[in-house]
């Protein structure tokens, strides 16, 4: 009985600290994945950022212990060629999503300290202006993959 009461008290405190859905900040990272890459080379990481908060937020940096440096890139058309370039931040509107994908915005990992092998994962830390840091495990897929692997079949 004492244990039950303590549990209920803890639940009550939790409900008080986390008042339901409309928190001012909150970022959910969905389907993080990367393409296989060689040690010493560069790799791209892709994912969807969902802003569950009521304020705009911005991805301001990314890092992984498996790369010497990591940048946020966007891809822009320059005449007939697509070029990527670093951007200081990516904005995620409240209630909206931003998808980083091949040919678009992505997390660029440079100077990989080990190969990214299909079927493995790598840790990635994303830092947001409001939501703070979010850590995810990025699933490595084949070098030519164009989208995250399906998690279930319809
Ligand atoms: Cu890039």
Image (tube, helix red, strand yellow):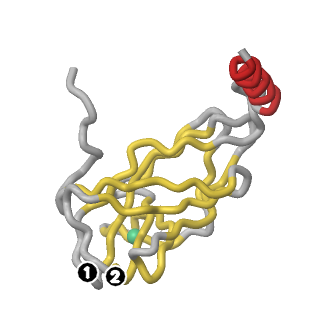
Indicate the quadrant where residue 132 lies: bottom right
Q: Mark 1 sits on what residue? A: 39
Q: Position of residue 62 (x, y in %)?
A: 53, 66
Left or right side of 93 for 150: left
Seen in the picture, residue 106 relative to 67 is either above or below; the reply is above
Seen in the picture, residue 66 relative to 29 is either above or below; the reply is below
Left or right side of 32 for 117: left
Q: Is mark 1 within 8 Å of ligand 1?
A: no
Q: Mark 2 sits on what residue? A: 113
Q: Earlier in the sequence, mark 1 or mark 2?
A: 1
Q: Identify which residue is drawn at 79% across, 23% down.
A: 9
Q: Position of residue 34 (x, y in %)?
A: 31, 59
Q: Identify which residue is drawn at 46% across, 62% down.
A: 124
Question: Is the N terminus in the top left, top right, bottom left or bottom right quadrant?
Answer: top right
Indicate the quadrant where residue 67 lies: bottom left
Left or right side of 80 for 46: right
SS for dot 1: loop
The foreground one among 131 and 8 is 8
The foreground one among 68 and 85 is 68
Contact between labelled residues 2 and 1, with CB atoms less than 8 Å apart: yes
Question: Is the C terminus in the top left, top right, bottom left or bottom right quadrant?
Answer: top left
Q: Identify which residue is drawn at 26% across, 61% down.
A: 35
Q: Position of residue 91 (x, y in %)?
A: 63, 52
Q: Which residue in the rendered view is the most extreme toward the top?
A: 1
Taking the image as four quarters, which one is ligand 1 found in? bottom left
Specify few, some or many for label 1: CA neighbours under 10 Å numbering under 14, 14-19, or 20 or more: some
Left or right side of 78 for 5: right
């Amino acid at each position: 009985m004492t244990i039950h009461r303590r549990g209920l008290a803890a639940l009550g405190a939790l409900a008080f600290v986390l008042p339901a859905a409309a928190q001012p900040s909150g970022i959910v990272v969905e389907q993080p994945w990367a393409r296989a890459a060689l040690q010493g080379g560069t790799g791209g990481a892709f994912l969807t950022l969902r802003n569950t908060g009521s304020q705009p937020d911005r991805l301001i940096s990314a890092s992984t212990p498996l790369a010497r440096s990591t940048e946020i890139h966007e891809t822009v058309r320059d005449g007939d060629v697509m070029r990527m370039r670093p951007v200081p931040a990516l904005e995620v509107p409240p209630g909206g999503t931003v998808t980083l994908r091949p040919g678009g915005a992505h997390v660029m990992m440079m100077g990989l300290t080990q190969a990214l092998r299909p079927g493995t994962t790598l840790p990635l830390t994303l830092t947001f202006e409001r939501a703070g840091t979010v850590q995810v495990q990025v699933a490595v897929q084949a070098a030519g993959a164009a989208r995250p692997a399906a998690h279930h079949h319809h």
